[in-house]
Amino acid sequence: MRKLPVLLFALLLILPPACSRRASLEDRLLERISMLSRTADLGTVEYTVRKAVKARDEGEWFKIGNRRILFSCTARLKAGIRLDAIPLDRIVVDEEERSVSMVLPHAVVLSINIPPELIRLEYEDVTGFRSHFDDRERQALLKQGEREIVRDLPKLGILTEAEANAEEFFRSMLTQMGFENIQINFE
Amino acid sequence: MNRLDRIRNFALAALLILIVGLLLGLWLRNPKRRARGVQVETTAAVVEEVHRIGELSSAGFYEELVITDRDDSPLAFLRKEEGIRRITGSGDFVIICKGRVRAGYDLTKMQPEDITVSRDTLYVNLPPVSVLDVIINPADYEHFAGHRTHEETVGIILQAKQRLRADAVQAGILDQAEAAGTASLERLLSTLGYRAVVLTPRRDLVFRPLEQGGR
């Protein structure tokens, strides 16, 4: 019986930090961070790319059964040029000749969008006493798929296409403005 | 059985245990066996479609938000009891998302007559600004608590995208996109030798309220 007050006192010491931890966690969850920013990107090409992500798990030696999963993802990649990187001091206009010469920056990938509705679980097979792939495991697989799409970007030729389209876009706009001799270079 | 036989039997048993132990150790250290576990294989990305666009993205919005999908199963009312919730968990599904919204002008909507030159002045009619992309990729969300199927998770992320879009519009992304887009185009076009550049963004009166509903 003598130990009871000591135990109660110890419990009182433990409880307040536990409660405050819970409150701070909830505060953190409710906290919203947002930011509005200015950009100046001219997107000139969009690639739709498809990729399959598959995984098999034979488990440890003491686990009976195995499991397999297959996802297909579709990503939309946009590339173009940054307008604020155009050197304005290198735009040369000759009004009499109706000619213009300008330098454009090389193209960059502007956005990678993998819409969730285009991520499809194509196949899942679980045998023996194994459990299904859980939320964290599925997300880890999809993250890996996303990383590989980013890794494959240089092989897709999207930047070359973006530069060709950017050149055509500027040519068309400058022709509309009355320029006859247009010279565009990428640097 | 004399004492010598007993010692011999004991030594044989010890040797046998040692050999079995060694074999088990070797098997456990076998790289092939250790390579078991989740093995991920990905195929090469295949380009399905190439689409020419002309989007001037002039404003971006970034937001980190928490999406909670409450448990609406028949067990939910039982879980309101503290004791049961401690055993079964709350049943709620919580994810933390980091999403991005891009807004600006879709310049492919411009017609040739939208660009006119009169004396030394360039007149350009711009299409109305719109939300170009709402992006939450797999790497942009973190699973915090609960369990849902893949299809349910997709539905929850779509809800998060709708909320992100509405928040971006409410934060003024369209006004920002119009102002910043006009400014950057004016800066570029004014270097082409015109005395004045007049940019007129088209405004659709019913456009903005509809935008908030999502597309």
Image (cartoon, coloured by chain):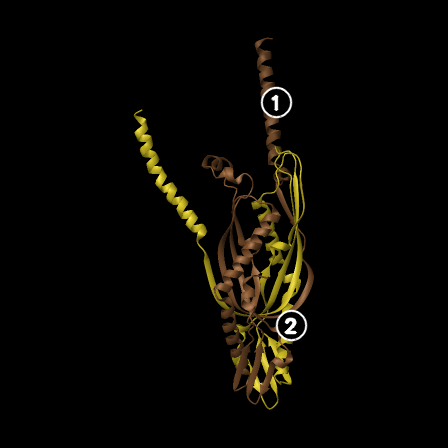
Q: Which residue is rendered at x = 52% and y = 57% of the image?
A: B163
What residue type is disc 2 on? Asn
The image quarter in which residue A185 lies:
bottom right
Q: Colour of chain A?
A: yellow
* Foreground disc of the pair 1, 2: 2
Q: Mark 1 and mark 2, same subunit? A: no
What residue type is disc 1 on? Leu
In the depicted structure, whether residue B110 falls above or below residue B131: below
**Residue A131, which numbered label?**
none
Alpha carbons under labels 1 and 2: distance apart: 75 Å
| Figure quadrant of the C terminus of chain A | bottom right
Left or right, residue A126 beside residue A84: right
Give the residue furthest to the top. Answer: B1
Q: Considering the numbered disc 1 on the image, is that residue within a helix, a strand or a loop?
A: helix
Q: Tell me which chain appears brown.
A: B
Q: Which residue is mark 2?
A: A165
In the image, residue A124 lies at what x, y percent?
66, 44
In the image, residue B61 lies at what x, y percent?
50, 63
Q: Which residue is rendered at x = 52% and y = 59% of the image?
A: B164
Crowd band around label 2 with a 10 angstrom C-alpha radius: few (<14), some (14–19), many (20+): some
| Figure quadrant of the N terminus of chain A | top left
Q: Chain of mark 2?
A: A
Q: Which residue is mark 1?
A: B16
In the image, residue A134 lies at what x, y percent?
58, 43
Q: Considering the numbered disc 2 on the image, is that residue within a helix, a strand or a loop?
A: helix
In the depicted structure, whether residue A11 falls above or below residue B148: above
In the image, residue A79 lies at what x, y percent?
60, 66
Q: Chain of mark 1?
A: B
Q: Nearer the viewer, residue A131 or A182?
A: A131
Crowd band around label 1 with a 10 angstrom C-alpha radius: few (<14), some (14–19), many (20+): few
